[in-house]
Image: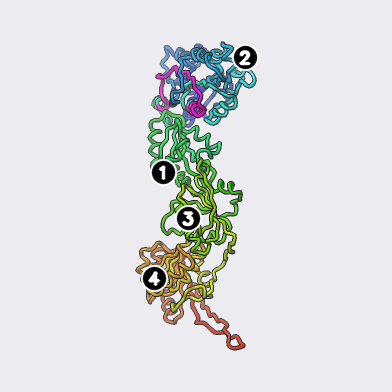
Amino acid sequence: MSEVLLYAGTTEGRELAQRLSEAGVTCDVCVATEYGSEVMPKLPGIQVLVGRLDVDGMRALALGGYHAVVDATHPYATEASGNIRKSLQGTDIPYFRLMRKKAMRDLDGNIQVFDDNESCAKALSATKGNILLTTGSKELAAYCSDEGVRKRLFVRVLPGMESISKCEELGIRGRQMIAMQGPFSKEMNLALFRQFSIAILVTKESGVSGGFAEKLAAAQEAGIPVYVIGNPERDKGMSFREVTEELSGLLGKRINGNEKIEISLIGIGMGPEMLTLEAKQKLDEAQLVFGAPRMLEGLTAGKESYPYYRAEDIVPVLRKRQGKSSGGTLKASVLFSGDTGFYSGCEKIKTELKQAIHGEIKIYPGISSVSYLAAKVGISWHDASLLSIHGRTGKQGWESQLLTSVTYHEKTFLLVSDAADIKKCGELLTEAGLGHCTLVCGFSLSYSDEQICQMKAEEAGKMPDQGLCTCLILNSTVEQMPLVPGLCDDAFLREKVPMTKEEVREVCLCKLGLTENAVVYDVGSGTGSIAVECALRSPDIRVYAIERKPEALALLKRNLEKFHLHHVVPVAGTAPEVLQDLEMPTHVFVGGSSGRMEEILRCVWEKNVDARVVVTAVSLETISEVTRLLDVFSNFKERSLYTQTTQLQVSRARELGAYHLMQAENPVTIFCMRLLCDES
């Protein structure tokens, strides 16, 4: 025999059945119709009984040995609730009336509340225009008694034979009958208003799960009045949480009474008009909405909204609301500008919410400003480079990223904060010899003050201040991206500062084995030739060029300016002291150590035991020192030192009259070193 007898037929009833099943409580669920059975999910320990029962039938069923009876019938099914209570008179079986959570009732005063269907139907007889009736088929007769009202009705009922037969019996046929299963979003309600030219909406005060809020929101947007049949049980019954707590104590099993949480992370595109239909539906269903103030405008009418866009602010609101819940499902939406997958905070918030809140989190993308601008100017963007400097200040490497992108890509889409960023970009491109590039700037895209303008990069300084912007940079003279290192020596400013020669640089860069997002120390940088070659491999590589001699440091900075390498940081001073405050290196090149090689290597591997180190030696003394250190670091931090030693002898041809003679450069010994675990 089951432990609980549950009279269902509502969303709350189905939710309670699921919670009982999860807690291992056996339950018999009574529904009046076959349709009620179809929408009840199949759950372990839950048996569905179909058919209407009178008082005697209910009493015979209740006396079968249940520990409790729960009445989760519809709030307007007052006769059914009365019969359930009568069936339990004279028994000691606990009875719990599960009430539906109420929804807001704010429609700018354009709402009338009636005590019953009869008084509402009488009021409708004095109106004009089509009527959308959403009170169900059981109360339909009250509205069909007046022929004038009946002809104006469009009736939304459940798609079951009982409801459809009732409509036909009362003269509701053809397009007047809308047989659909909810829930219905605001957009769906609006669509029905428009399709059938609805002038008045009639609904019950059906609570949150009955879609009452979505109906009111749609009516408010459409500007039509709402006639509401008030809840006859306004102050009776128990909340979902109260019922689950009572059953938990009675049965000795913990039944979860908290609201489940569904969180929708929604990209709104450039503005409210750009929402996808799926995103609109989720937003309409939401009881709580979070987002930056400008995003909430026009999207949260009649909803509980908060100007929060960080998880640390959102989580306390969700927990507080869940703590005061009456069961069911709490639906919340978090709004993001543009597309959730394109330079968005969506991924970070999803991770943080998932760690803090037990619930379902789904992402609904929006239309990005890049997609919108590309469509406006009639070009594709699948082959474009995509960047963002929105909100990025100071020297963060974006300058090098932008120059690399524009130099090697015909199309670069760039998200910026405002016109000031456009001016910075124009200045940067002009300095780099790219002033001929075309900037296509889209301001306030999708809004009424949308503006798209076009200019050369060298003209960007004349741009007036504007609002939010997305920029397309077109370069008709793109270069082919080099796949290997190998700048010629003449590409660098040299003066009298020593420089690692071209062929040696190429070998050393290969030995370094640079990767994306590498952090490189160039110790004893000199002219900066190694630092430049490393930085040119990718704008995402960060390079620290360490040099102690003032004249060499000055030349180093000039070479960085020549190649527009803003992600190389020149560091004045002597290693290893100046290395202490730098971020952890992944790759280190030592071209000059001033006799402190051991200290430099120790400092590097203390900071990162996995750092890869390349050292060049020309003098016999340096070769001897490095060779000695191979024993010193042979078991450093319980790791073995792996060393690859190469000596490079380069000869170059020079002209001597009518002949070309090979002239030898000094041999260079290259040590490539790594600390490896024994199993490696």
The residue nearer to you, when weighing 572 against 57, is: 572
For marks 2 and 3, the one nearer the N-term is 2
Query: In the image, is residue 101 above or below residue 139?
Result: below
Question: For mark 1, does the 10 Å Cα neighbourhood hold few (<14), some (14 to 19), or many (20 or more) residues?
Answer: some
The three-letter amino acid code for the residue at tag 2 is Gly
Tell me, yes or no, if residue 63 can be seen here.
no
What's the CA distance linking mark 3 and mark 1? 37 Å
Whether tag 3 and tag 4 are in contact, CB under 8 A, the answer is: no
Amino acid at dot 1: Arg
Q: Which residues are magenta?
A: 213-241
Left or right relative to 412: residue 636: left
Query: Mark 2–mark 1 contact, CB under 8 Å?
Result: no
Say the numbered circle drawn on residue 600. 4
Q: Earlier in the sequence, mark 3 or mark 4?
A: 3
Residue drawn at 62 percent across, 14 percent down? 171
**Disc 3 residue type (three-letter):** Lys
Q: Position of residue 232 (x, y in %)?
A: 44, 17
Residue 446's spot in the image, x, y percent? Answer: 53, 42
Residue at 49% in and 40% down: 265
Does residue 406 sit above or below 270 in this rendering? Answer: below
Tell me the amino acid under the disc marked 4. Answer: Ile
Which mark's residue is nearer the viewer, 3 or 4?
3
> Which residue is identified by label 1?
310
The crowd level at tag 4 (other Cα within 10 Å; few <14, some 14-19, many 20+) is some
The residue beneath circle 3 is 462
Asked whether residue 167 is drawn in magenta, I would say no
CA distance for labels 2 and 3: 71 Å
Which residue corresponds to mark 2?
171
